[in-house]
Image (cartoon, rainbow, N blue to C red):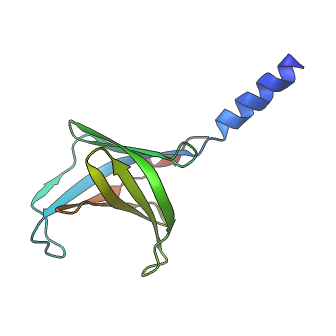
Amino acid sequence: MKKIMFLLLLSGSLYAQEQVFNVQRYCIDEQPFKKGECNTVGNEYSFVFLDTQKRTVVFFLTATKMKYKIVDSGVFAPDKNYSFYTLENEKGQLEMRINTQKTKIEFLYPNTHVYLTVGKSTKAMR
């Protein structure tokens, strides 16, 4: 019986909903927002960890680590090719969008928009 319980727990953890996105390029646009323009562009060490089961997002942008709790999610109504996540931490709320191909991620802060291009190493950890 203990072996069966262990195998069930192990298989459940293997099918966790965590996804790891390896960012190939980032574009940071600050107010006033201008479509297609970036105040800062780079390709340094950046990752996004999305865990829908634990309802958490961890975003590493170069030397900065930001942790968020997912408070809402769904399909982005104006563009069905994107999913949205409303995120929250001690500094407030923001919206994150991910396209269905999982090649673009957007973090939309009130005063800053961060656009990420995700590389081929994006994978779901299962």
> Residue at coordinates 66% horizontally, 35% vertically from top-left?
14
Query: In this rendering, is residue 21 above or below 104?
Result: above
Q: Residue furthest top?
A: 2
At x 49%, y 62%, the residue is 73
Tell me residue 64's x, y (percent).
22, 38
> In the displayed structure, does residue 35 sit left or right of residue 60?
left
Q: Nearer the viewer, residue 76 or 47?
A: 76
Is 43 positioned to the left or the right of 39 in the image? right
Number of marks in the rendered image: 0
**Which of 73/22 is in front?**
73
Extreme-right residue of the structure: 1
Against 108, is 78 above or below?
A: below
Residue 108 image-quadrant placement: bottom left
Frontmost residue, 48 versus 9: 9
Residue 16 vs 94, above or below: the answer is above
The x, y position of residue 45, in whole percent, is 26, 40
Q: Quarter of the image containing the C terminus?
A: top right
Q: Position of residue 101 (x, y in %)?
A: 48, 65
**Left or right of 73 in this view: 63:** left
Quarter of the picture holding the N terminus: top right
Q: Residue at x 44, y 60 (%)?
A: 85
Is residue 52 in view? Answer: yes
